[in-house]
Amino acid sequence: MKSPRSDGQKFIIPSFFFIVALCVLAFINEIRFDSFLRFGRCALANIPVQNSSSSSSDILLSENVNSSSSSAAEEIRILIGILTLPDQYQRRHFLRLVYGTQTPPDGAKIDVKFVFCNLTKEDQKVLVALEIMRYDDIVILNCPENMNKGKTYTYFSSLPDLFNDTDGPNPPYHYVMKADDDTYIRLESLVESLRRLPRDDLYYGYVIPCPSMDPFVHYMSGMGYLVSWDIVEWLRDSDIPKKHIEGPEDKVFGDWIREGRRGKNRFNAKWSMYNFPEPPTRCTHELWPDTIAVHLLKNQEKWIRTLNFFNVTSNLKPSKLYHIP
């Protein structure tokens, strides 16, 4: 007669080996699964971003985004230079309201500067000096005031000497923008559109002529285009722009980029950047939420309609000191 103890031993021994086998199998599968996850992450990191030129909220990525060229954790630093004229005092004061009341996006440092050439009148020397003392947001270039005779080149090529500082971050800005004073830029939308983009060899904006969607064939509209800091330094050092200064400034800028084989990362922000819808042209559409910039705001009525559409005064704090219906 078999003892209960021997039967128990017969059951326990196979069970022990079965459990060991399960543990080994689980360990092997865990290694394989972990390797599969690592492979999957690697594969996803190299999938080109799919784009649709018909989508209002998409930016056309003309090169694959290299995840190593930008860091979500690093603060994005942007300089927006608004090219204007010394006598445009009221326009500058108005734009200070427009940009000064926008809440700075998290993880972004944005400096808005007003850019023009040398002062020529006594009243300018006094009034502009007062502006600088109060706001410190003006850059006076060493050039005669002009259109299409080198002001854009002077702006970009002067920046490295103006802003490179051994005590500050390097580079001082990741991106530099040239904008018109009749353009409304929504800063948060601009930052969000830049977060995943490369921070080197970048050329970003609204491709013109209107039907074009290819930034490698045409160039960016002067409503507001942006380049990375390395291109700014190249413009200062290269002989290419020096040989071809005069002409339609934005087209000439595109010629420099093409001839110098710069801007391998080009991004078309159409139709998140567009002209005001009236009068209707091939470059316009209605105002809509997925907007980075609206151009051709030539009068106060157009500015007010645009600002109302985006509810820019919705954060007005209630107070007994005023009542605005």
Image (cartoon, rainbow, N blue to C red):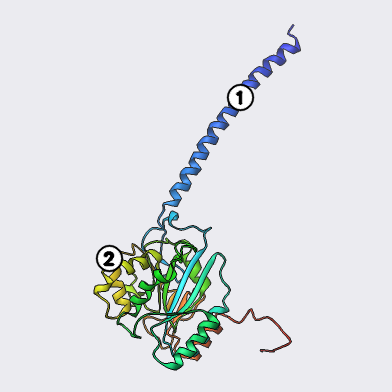
Q: Residue at x 53, y 34 (%)?
A: 29
What's the residue type where badge 1 is placed?
A: Val
Residue situated in front as seen by the camera: 87 or 163? 163
Q: Residues within 10 Å of mark 1 (few under 14, many from 20)?
A: few
Name the image quarter holding the N terminus. Answer: top right
Q: Is residue 63 left or right of residue 16?
A: left
- Say what secondary structure mark 2 lies in: loop
Residue reaching furthest to the top: 1
Q: Position of residue 40 (x, y in %)?
A: 47, 46
User: Is label 1 in contact with label 2 (beta carbons under 8 Å)?
Assistant: no
First in sequence, mark 1 or 2: give its number: 1
Residue situated in front as seen by the camera: 288 or 305? 305
Quickly name the residue at label 1. Answer: 20
Q: Position of residue 193 (x, y in %)?
A: 47, 67
Q: Residue at x 52, y 39 (%)?
A: 33
Q: Is residue 177 visible?
A: yes
What's the residue type where badge 2 is placed?
A: Gly
Q: Is residue 150 left or right of residue 45?
A: left
Q: Is residue 11 left or right of residue 96?
A: right
Q: Position of residue 69 (x, y in %)?
A: 43, 57
The answer to whether 87 is drawn above or below residue 156 in the figure is below
Quickly name the residue at label 2. Answer: 260
- Say what secondary structure mark 1 lies in: helix
Name the image quarter holding the C terminus. Answer: bottom right
The circle drawn on residue 110 is: none
Q: Residue at x 39, y 90 (%)?
A: 120
Q: Position of residue 133 (x, y in %)?
A: 53, 82
> How much space separates mark 1 and mark 2, taking CA atoms?
66 Å
Residue situated in front as seen by the camera: 133 or 303? 133
The answer to whether 66 is drawn above or below residue 323 in the figure is above
